[in-house]
Amino acid sequence: VHVNAACHDLAFVCFHQEDSPMREKDPPMSERPDVGAMRRSFLESYLHAMGDASSKEDVDALLIDTCLAACGHHFGIAGQHSPIFDYKLDPEAISGLTRFKEHAAELLASDAEQHRFHEAGPEGWFALKGYGKLIKTKSSEEIIDAFRFF
């Protein structure tokens, strides 16, 4: 039996939905519903089913938590197998991880930064912070294709 924290399960559903075992039977991306709307609807339903408040603000907060949890997945931008951070005490990798933690802390603490996050969407916010460019210079196309953030 394998048990994950709920945040990792939510992150997988919201940010790795293209890794579906049935993906060959799924419609092309151009024919699927809006991914942002799907994420928000799923998170709202999750909160409601838990008996928690599920207002727009509650869903906004959970989306941020879910997005940051997705970064900690195995190949997420802060995960143990990240294509960006080589955890062999490489000073550049340690510096990159420190920057990521600072960006995450700023996102959690700042209403203005949260507004930018929701306005740009998760992938857009990470691109604004430079992660899209960084991952494309440090990883293979297969990794880029496998993860929705970039």
Image: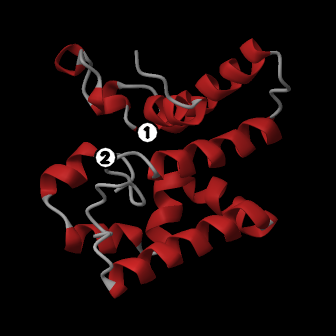
In terms of depth relative to the viewer, which is nearer, 88 or 75?
A: 88
Rendered image quadrant of residue 77: bottom left
- Disc 2 residue type? Phe
Question: What is the number of the mark on residue 139?
Answer: none
Asked whether, in this view, residue 104 is left or right of residue 108, the answer is: left
Question: Whole-Å distance between the Cαs marked 2 and 1?
Answer: 7 Å
| Contact? badges 2 and 1 (CB < 8 Å) | yes
Residue under label 1, please give it. Answer: 15
Residue under label 2, please give it. Answer: 147
Residue 102 location in percent, x, y?
A: 61, 74
114 in relation to 148, above or below: below
Residue 111 location in percent, x, y?
A: 80, 64
Report the quarter where the C terminus lies.
bottom left
Extreme bottom residue here?
91
In terms of depth relative to the viewer, which is nearer, 107 or 24?
A: 107
Q: Say which label, 2 or 1, has the lower sequence index.
A: 1
- Disc 1 residue type? Phe
Rendered image quadrant of residue 45: top right
In terms of depth relative to the viewer, which is nearer, 106 or 41?
A: 106
SS for dot 2: loop
49 in relation to 123, above or below: above
